[in-house]
Amino acid sequence: MSLEEDLRAETEKWLIRAEKALETVSARGEVGERFRVNIAAYLSDCRYFLEQDDLIRAFEAVIWAWAWIEIGQDVKMLISEG
């Protein structure tokens, strides 16, 4: 596999994980909902950048989404439903 193929595969793997993770959390109040909105925006950006073959920005966007999920859970603004 080429570097580009590896980066695309890794980005798509984390995109799927992040989308599933977002589905399994609920927002706690208005701040939690802002977390969810930001995460969804990063995931949307990731998909857009993948379509444009901008793999670095796509990977950055999915990593930011994942970070927001983890931070949201750590500060109890996102609550796991499962």
Image (cartoon, helix red, strand yellow):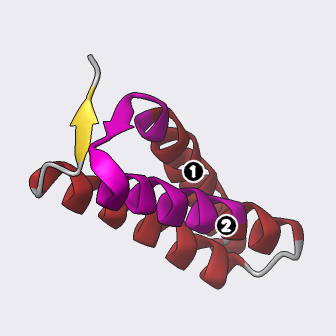
Picture residue at 35% right of the left edge, 34% below the top:
25
> Which residue carries the number 1 mark?
15
User: Residue flagged by tag 2: what amino acid is it?
Assistant: Cys
Q: Main secondary structure of the magenta part?
A: helix
Picture residue at 58% right of the left edge, 67% below the top:
42
> Which residue carries the number 2 mark?
46
- Percent across and percent down for residue 41 are 62, 65
Above or below: residue 49 compared with residue 34: below
Give the structural element (helix, strand or loop) at label 1: helix
Q: Which residues are magenta?
A: 21-44
Q: Earlier in the sequence, mark 2 or mark 1?
A: 1
Give the structural element (helix, strand or loop) at label 2: helix
- Percent across and percent down for residue 7 are 60, 67
Picture residue at 30% right of the left edge, 48% below the top:
29
Instruction: Residue at the far right: name it.
Output: 52
Q: Residues within 10 Å of mark 1 (few under 14, many from 20)?
A: many
User: Residue flagged by tag 1: what amino acid is it?
Assistant: Leu
Mark drawn on residue 76 = none
Residues at marks 2 and 1 touching, judged by CB atoms closer than 8 Å: yes
The quadrant of the image that shows the C terminus is top left
Instruction: Residue 33: say if magenta.
Output: yes
Q: Does 21 sit left or right of 13 as displayed?
A: left
